[in-house]
Amino acid sequence: MASVIATGISQLVLLTVYWAGLSDAAAASTLAFLVGSVPHFLMVRYWAWRDTDPGRLRHQLTTYFTVTLVGGITSIALTTLAEVLLLPLVGGQGWRAVMLTLTYLAASGPVFLAKFTLFDRAFAGRAQRAYDATSSTKVRAANPVAPVVTSS
């Protein structure tokens, strides 16, 4: 859900900035990527990962922004390439903006899958291992008590 919301934010920024003619595809998609990344990190940290330990924030930020930056560069490069190859075939700034937005969205799909896999291994896997370690089926009492036998 966090990715859907962040993608929606990015798409809105990209469409608005490019449609208004404020920048080219590279700058518009870079701005869209940055604007979507910040709320995405906050949503996944507090909502999906449920890991608010301040001692791990540096590790989380480093991992998140490294993986996200690689994905962002990929999306930006594909969007820029689409502007060069496809957009000259489309007339009108509005249609060009829609085409660019669809390209950015299409590029985000494979990037999302790769990011999800990496984040799942880096963060969710750790949370699952912590849960498994404390699960009631795995924890044994320190001094188990034998069942009481009564005679009647």
Image (tube, rainbow, N blue to C red):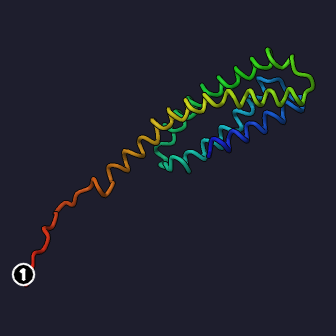
**Position of 51 compared to 152: left or right?**
right
Percent across and percent down for residue 110 are: 60, 28
Q: Residue at x 14, y 70 (%)?
A: 147
**Position of 43 compared to 22: left or right?**
left
**Position of 89 compared to 9: left or right?**
right
In the picture as drawn, the residue positioned furthest to the right comes out as 92
Determine which quarter of the picture holds residue 97: top right
Q: Residue at x 22, y 57 (%)?
A: 140
- What is the three-letter code of the residue carrying label 1? Ser
Tell me: residue 19, above or below residue 88: below
**Position of 94 compared to 52: left or right?**
right
How many numbered markers are drawn? Answer: 1
Q: Residue at x 84, y 33 (%)?
A: 17
Tell me: residue 144, above or below residue 62: below
In the picture as drawn, the residue positioned furthest to the bottom comes out as 152
Percent across and percent down for residue 73 are: 65, 23
In the picture as drawn, the residue positioned furthest to the left comes out as 151
Percent across and percent down for residue 28 are: 79, 29
Circle 1 residues within 10 Å: few <14, some 14–19, many ≥20: few
Name the quadrant of the C terminus: bottom left
Determine which quarter of the picture holds residue 116: top right
Residue on which the image places disc 1: 151
For this rendering, which residue is in front, 135 or 70? 135
Determine which quarter of the picture holds residue 78: top right
Q: Residue at x 55, y 46 (%)?
A: 45
Percent across and percent down for residue 21 are: 89, 28
In the picture as drawn, the residue positioned furthest to the top comes out as 85
Label 1: which secondary element: loop
